[in-house]
Amino acid sequence: MADEAPDAALSALVAAARRSSVARRVQGDVETRLLQSIVEATVRLFDAEAASIALFESDPDRLEFRVAAGEKGAGAVGLTVPPTQGIAGYVYSTGQALALSDVATDPRFNRDAAEQTGYVPRSIAAAPLLDEHGTAGVLQVLDKRGSPTFSLRDMELLAVFAGQATVAIAAARVQRDTARLLRSVLTGLDPALAESGVEELVSRMTAGLDDEEETPFWRLVDQVARLRGLSDSETTLVADILEVVAAHAARSQRPRALR
Amino acid sequence: MSEPYLPAWSEVFADPRRGLRRSLRLRGVTRDWAWGGSTGAGVRVGIIDSGLENDHPQLHGRVVENVTVEMTDDGPRVVPDELRDLYGHGTACGAIILSLAPEVEIVSIRVLGADLRGKGTAFAAGLEWAIEQRLEVCNLSLSSKSESLYPVFHDLADRAYFQSTALISAANNVPAPSYPSLFSSVFSVAAHGEPDPWRLYYNPTPPVEFGAWGVDVPIAWKDGGSTVATGNSFAAPHVAGLVALILSKHPGLSPFEVKAILASVADNPGRRHPWRRRAVAAQ
């Protein structure tokens, strides 16, 4: 079944997958950097003790705190909580924003997760990151310094930041999930294609694109990424050198798949 | 109440003098007529949420049934529920409803908590069960974004409307489609910030039709506790309580009729209505 896909389309998809992987490697973790900038803006605008973004991950189902900002925020990064509990879990499950004003004054408040971060807040506002598939995660703000509670305006602002975070995630994930993208393209091209056929094609297209591997090709890409700090004239010099090397390589051997 | 930035779902309720003028006043339809003397007795209110804590002091033992949706190989199945409220949220909604309508019977339909897989499907199955039970009122402080469930929820909302089950649905806080909270057949509710559980606005510019208290609301929370919270989730139960009061005093009214009554007794600024002042005083 895999062999029935037109060769031209196949090689175009392979090229697209390779470009996407290289771009991701060169640019670094765009998603985390974008989300970091969003929580930093959130903390500043709310004048809050902390802000954080948790994203949903499956197997096992969990909310993972990816980024945090603010004086009391650092402890949250890397923490995972069950998506079935707590404020973040509720907001994730329902897709509804929620603000609690005196969580810590209630002696029965379940503070286990909060204590793991080293900071137990008095107030929390949380908004869902809603994309077209549902809820991708949760944006939280802890303890506004100027006020013990969150106003309607705060909730609206939080929703705006949550919207930005959702867009950032969607944009970054197109890059990250090359395989998922290919899967959807292939299924769209040929609805009759069986799941096993799709998987076989995807694995052929993405072969050699695992950037966890330290192959010479990825070392080269990493070097290129470092060139971004150079001036124009220095970059031109490097490009000239590479051109000579590439021309030499082309003369001395037949082209091979980049590895 | 003239803050420079206001939420999409609530801004219309922040300055009632500007956005909420409308002329409908049904002569004789006052708060006193609508629910004066009513306690909600005889009305069953379903709460589709995170479950309810039956022994929470603010629920006064009014929870008569707890069910949940189990996902099986043959599809979702509604079964008796053993779990407590994992979040506190369902309990909060129940306590708000009882604070207005103390003698309603509450049916907890838990669709959140233990297993998140297929949660949109579980939500739809829980709603279908509530409709099959012919509950008079159902509070939905949650919604689904699933495109594929759009027709399912649309059908369920219509079935509820035609058999006179009032679905009270919290509007989502982002201006994006969510179901069934923006269907015309449900009572779509967003928050206003005036600390008065009886203060109700009718919004003549839908999809959100009603505004109720949803900012810094003292609420019941898990493990017998309480806290203070903000969200449309806590505005919807205020309207559910009012609807229960009306249906207790006037059994058999359709959702259309109940909406007209709410619009008529709403606190929107408008012409002077001497009978309304008496009705509010009776409260």
Image (tube, rainbow, N blue to C red):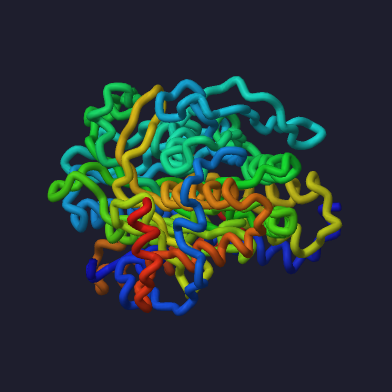
Image position, residue B78 (x, y; %): 72, 32
**Depicted B132 relative to depicted B2: above or below:** above
**Depicted B174 relative to depicted A211: above or below:** below
Image position, residue A56 (x, y; %): 49, 41
Quadrant in the picture for residue A13: bottom right
Image position, residue A88 (x, y; %): 41, 39
A63 left or right of B251 in image = left
A210 left or right of A115 in image = right
Determine the residue positioned at 46% across, 29% down. Answer: B59
Determine the residue positioned at 48% across, 41% down. Answer: B101
Q: Nearer the viewer, residue B235 or B83?
A: B235
- Which residue sits furthest left? A146
Instruction: Count the numbered circles shown.
Output: 0
Determine the residue positioned at 60% across, 34% down. Answer: B107
Q: Nearer the viewer, residue A234 or A199?
A: A199
Q: Nearer the viewer, residue A39 or B19?
A: B19
Residue B158 visible here: yes
Image position, residue A180 (x, y; %): 62, 52
**Depicted B91 relative to depicted B5: above or below:** above
Residue A220 visible here: no
Quadrant in the picture for residue B104: top right
Determine the residue positioned at 25% across, 62% down. Answer: A229
